[in-house]
Image (tube, rainbow, N blue to C red):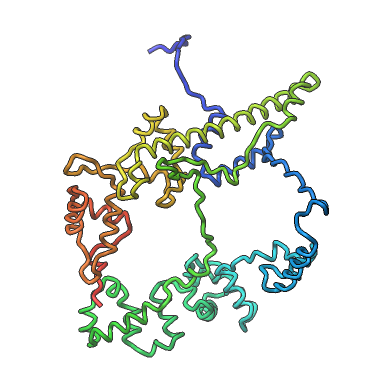
Amino acid sequence: MALEIRQQLKLTQQLHMTPMLKQAISLLLFSRQELVEAVQRELLENPFLEEREEEVQPEAEEVRRPKEQDVPWSQEEVTRTAEWEEYMGEFSSQSRTAQEYEAPDGDMTPLEAMHSAEPDLQAHLMAQLLLSPLTEKQIRIGECIIGNLDETGYLIASDEEIAQLAEVSAEEVPPVLDTVQNFDPVGVAARTLSECLLIQLRAEKYDRDPILTSLVRDHLEDLEKQRFKPLLRQFRIDLDTLKEYICIIQGLEPRPGGSLGSAQTCYVSPDIFVRKVNGEFVILMNDDELPQIQLSPMATELSGSCELRTSSEKDYMCDRLNSAKWMIRSLEERRRTLYQVMASIVKHQREFFEHGVYRLRPLVLKDIAEDIGRSESSISRITTNKYVGTPHGIFELKYFFNSGLSASDGSQVGSESVKARIRSFIDAEDCAHPLSDEELSSRLAEALGIKVARRTVAKYREELGIPSSSKRKKHL
């Protein structure tokens, strides 16, 4: 077979993602906090963008002081009013002393003093380590131990690894480890749950009871799965005595470092609100904390004097100007798309906004895409990490998209409604006789008129993080 070189013409179509198009797509995916950070970063980098200042309302005209002849009351009435104010004194809503005193600027508490950072677990333990009567070498070992704790307070390194980090022998680690384990919170730096609980038992002087020690050391799994009869036979105790032991174990802390974790609570700020006004649902965009940007006047001034600049300066100016215009256009497009998607969701899920989660209907991305004339990929992006404040709470936009189950009357019931029913049934059940998956299926058929298989009920229950009936049953 001979090899030869030929020229060939070929016509193909290719989609090239420009940087501006990538930026517009990424803005759809951004959460509210990420969007604020992206806009602020663009404001710093792009000289053609500036933050739009809020319009200041014109100040009201100063109230004209009435002249003495214009006053409709006599001087005696004014005197009586002053005397009355003097009589009220400290009984008024604000005392005369408070009205006359103005704190100087130097007396104001600085902002830094109003915020107190909560100490994390490592800082809490390091403060105790430095105050303990240990040598410098032992303190170095303790620092390595504290540095290898996870967020719950458990030690994730072996004695050999700690010795290698501290450049000491492995025999010098256990004494320091025993000291750290008795720091506050007691039980920290343990490697297993049993070890953590045993340390707390020793601190509370409960380790003198061999039955309690054996339960913690060897039978935690039996207690978790509520296998009580073998334990009663093995230790030759009655149910009331076992109940006392379990109460003591439940009073121990399985996660000693959990209360001093460094994680901060994250609060969700809705991107959009839905409120009912005069029988109709109104959609309000939440623009708080989001910088309102516009082209700066410098853009017009510099574009008018481009003939005096070099080609590289012209290219930079054109690039920054186009980027600024594209950012403004992309933000407006994102806002418009989010509003249209929310309006379509309200139209499809009106029963939910009227009555709550039990009336949530089946909905897929294709329904919203066809309604507003967008692609399913755009709907998926704009509903990711976006939240809406409703009369029934704050929900992610993805929450409104769920599969459906057919009811006996031919209607559709959303899977989230079924999950909410399952949770309500389990919350109201008798702990001594919890509902099985079969019983939950029967109750769903009575309440919603749908036939849900036992396996489907079990799947929904597991998605809700609810254990099976055998694990929910309270024997004691």
| Above or below, comparing residue 162 to residue 242 in the picture | above
Residue 71 pos. (x, y %): 78, 54
Q: Is residue 444 left or right of residue 8?
A: left
Q: Is residue 263 above or below residue 19?
A: below
Vertical placement of 51 versus 234: above or below? above
**Residue nearest the observer in this picture, 4 or 29:** 29
Q: Nearer the viewer, residue 74 or 450?
A: 74
User: Which residue is at 47% across, 69% downward?
Assistant: 154
Residue visible at 52% across and 27% down in the picture: 17
The residue at the far right in this view is 68
- Left or right: residue 298 versus residue 407 is right
Q: Quadrant of the N terminus?
A: top left
Determine the image quadrant of residue 376.
top left
Residue 310 is situated, as x and y percent measured from the top left of the image, at 78, 22
- Pick the residue in front: 130 or 250: 250
Which part of the image, by quadrant, shows the C terminus? bottom left
Task: Give the tally of numbered discs.
Answer: 0
Q: Residue furthest bottom?
A: 208
Image point (36%, 29%), residue name: 370
Give the quadrant of residue 34.
top right
* Residue 143, position as x, y percentages in the image: 59, 71
Give left or right: position of 97 versus 131.
Answer: right
x, y percentage for residue 334?
52, 34
Rendered residue at 37%/34% (across/down): 368
